[in-house]
Image (cartoon, grey):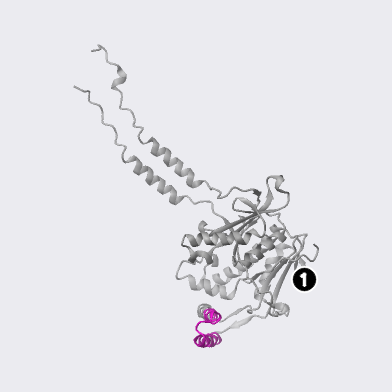
Amino acid sequence: MPKFKNKKDKGSAEISTASLPDIIFMLLFFFMVTTVMRETPLKVKIDLPSATETIRLEDRSLLDYIYVGKPFDERFGTLEQIQLNDQFAELADIQTYVMNRRSEREARGEEAMIPSVTTVLKIDEGTKMGIISDIKSELREVQALKLNYSTLVRNE
Amino acid sequence: MARRESGEINAGSMADIAFLLLIFFLVTTTMDKDNGIMRQLPPPTPDDYVPPPVRERDVFKVLANANDQLLVEGNLMEIENLGDAVKQFYTNPEASEDLPQLQWMRKTDVQNNLDIAKANLRQAPNDNEARKNVKKWENKLKAVELLGDYQTLPGSAIISMQNNRGTSYNLYVQVQNELSVALNELRDELSLEKFSVKFSDLDPKNEQDKPKIIAIRQVYPQRVSEAEARSTGGG
């Protein structure tokens, strides 16, 4: 038996660290939610134009994306390119892309949603209208008629 | 005998609290969503399709060339003035010969047309066109009941933007935006006058606002036609 008791022994009980993982998870989830994740890595540089009369798109499952811009990597060319999913595409691939997206939706049992699918065009503001008109006529061919010209929001 | 320690705090409920907070953030944080201008493309036309003849005065022509200059109804115009020109087109305040002749929608006429449309539908119950026609006149009747007799653009009147293949996308979006601005301002004005609330503040999910939105859309319909780009002119 020691004659002098250690003072530290008398201190208050240690704080339980059992909840630490929970707190960490909470922070993790918080950042997961607030960070906007890009569905596909962009291969083209896109500076969106700005507009005032915009509509906010709500349901991501009802959106198809088409990207148009100049490639980041100049080895892929210095002219505007179309990107579908995560790769460069030709004009002729657009119809296949829309059809694929449709059959994916059918496989998920969402046939009823197909008419309300919006095609979002994310296009660099410097792009010439020629290629965009070509894209639009491709979309018309496959009856993908709802369009959204993606823009930044500008306040007047 | 063991020394009495102060009881450890029960951490079992910590996870619940954490989840509660997590759900709170999930609900309150809004993700940065995509914004943009909505447009509807016309359905594909068969090769032998001949567009119906339109009167020159019923078409509001916006032409854009490869140098991003605008030619509106034959006059060189800055984009700032486009909105006013569109408003003139919709309202034709001086009954000009160059702008569309507005049609009066009166309750008796609308009712008659609705009856005719319904009779047609009874004769051909599976005809989609006939069903659409009934729907169209039903909407017009609702509009007349809410707003009283009104004047609107004839069915053939359209705003047509034609651009060169070299026109920049930015200019295209700005023109589309200006067209929407002008239309929304007209709708806001009418809505303020009739319902003392802005059109943009009407809620499409609200049962009371829904007929108001439909009615105002009848008076000032969205009439932008998405024509294909041409390679002629300043290419």
Asked if the stretch drawn in magenta spans residue B129, the answer is yes
**Please, what is the three-letter code of the amino acid marked with disc 1?**
Gly
Q: Which of A104 and B148 is in front in this view?
A: A104
Residue found farthest to the left: B1
Q: What stretch is highlighted in magenta?
A: B109-136
Which is more toward the observer, A85 or A46?
A85
Is residue B188 visible in the rendered image? The answer is: yes
Q: Which residue lies furthest to the right in this view?
A: B234
Report if residue A48 is visible in the image: no
Q: Quickly name the residue at label 1.
A: B74
B10 shown above or below B97:
above
Can you tell which quarter of the image residue A20 is in?
A: top left
Q: Quadrant of residue A131?
A: bottom right
Task: State which quarter of the image contains the N terminus of chain B.
Answer: top left
Q: Does the magenta stretch include residue A97?
A: no
User: Left or right of B53: which side holds B104?
Assistant: left
Other-residue count near label 1 (Cα within 10 Å), few / some / many at <14 / 14–19 / ≥20: few
Examine the residues drawn in magenta and state their main secondary structure. Answer: helix
